[in-house]
Amino acid sequence: MLEIRTPELPDGASAKVVRVRFAVGERVEKGDCLFEIETQKVILDVIAPEDGEMHENIVKKGDIVKSEQIICLINDDKDTYYEDVEHLQAQLKKHKKSSVKSAKVSADKNSSKSDTDNSDGASQTAFVIICVLIVFACILVFL
C-alpha cells in the first residue's frame, strides 16, 4: 500500500485541495496527476509514484492540507498480487476443509448404507440357505 502525501510546503504553510482526479477503485499509472493543491502562490500537482489502484481518498475537494500529510492510499500491483494470493490461499483452505467434511459425511453415510446393505445381503443369503435346506429336507422325506 502506497501512502501518497502532499509535497513539502514552506514554513508550515497549508494548501487547499482544488481537484481530485481519481475515484476509489480507478486504475492509476506512474506519473498521473492524482490531486491539484493550491497554496497562496502556486498550484501543485500530486503525482502517482507507481502504477496501482486508488484504494482510499482521504481528502476531498475543498479540504485544507498540511505539508507531507497523507492524502490517499494506492494499492500498488505488488499489494494486489499478494492480496490475491492470500485470498486464493484462504479459499483453498476453506475448500479443503469443506471437502474433508463432505468426504467424512459421505463416508459415514456410505458406511451406514453398506452396513445396512451388508445386513440385507446377509439376511438374503441366510434366507436362501434356509430355503435350500427345506427343499433338501422335503426331498429326503419323500424318498
Image (tube, rainbow, N blue to C red):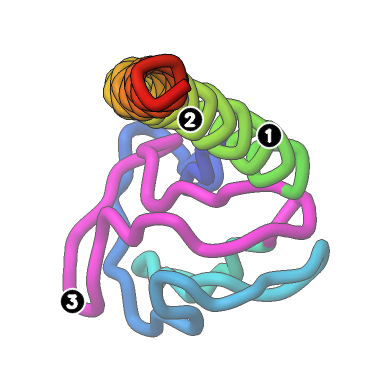
The residue at 39%/33% (across/down) is: 11
- Seen from the viewer's position, the closer of residues 138 and 45 is 138
Determine whether the residue tagged by mark 3 lies in a helix, strand or loop.
Answer: loop
Determine whether the residue tagged by mark 2 lies in a helix, strand or loop.
Answer: helix
Determine whether the residue tagged by mark 1 lies in a helix, strand or loop.
Answer: helix
- Measured Cα–Cα span from mark 2 to mark 1: 21 Å
What label does residue 62 carry, if any? Answer: 3
Quarter of the figure with residue 1:
top right
The residue at 33%/61% (across/down) is: 57
Quarter of the figure with residue 64:
bottom left
Residue bearing mark 2: 99
Mark 2 or mark 1, whichever is nearer to me: 2
The kind of residue on which mark 2 rests is Ser
Q: How far across and down, in percent of the image, does residue 125 sit?
A: 43, 22
Give the residues in magenta.
48-76
The kind of residue on which mark 3 rests is Gly
Residue bearing mark 1: 85
Which of the two discs, 2 and 1, labels the residue nearer the N terminus?
1
Quarter of the figure with residue 108:
top left
Which of the two discs, 1 and 3, labels the residue nearer the N terminus?
3
The residue at 63%/43% (across/down) is: 84
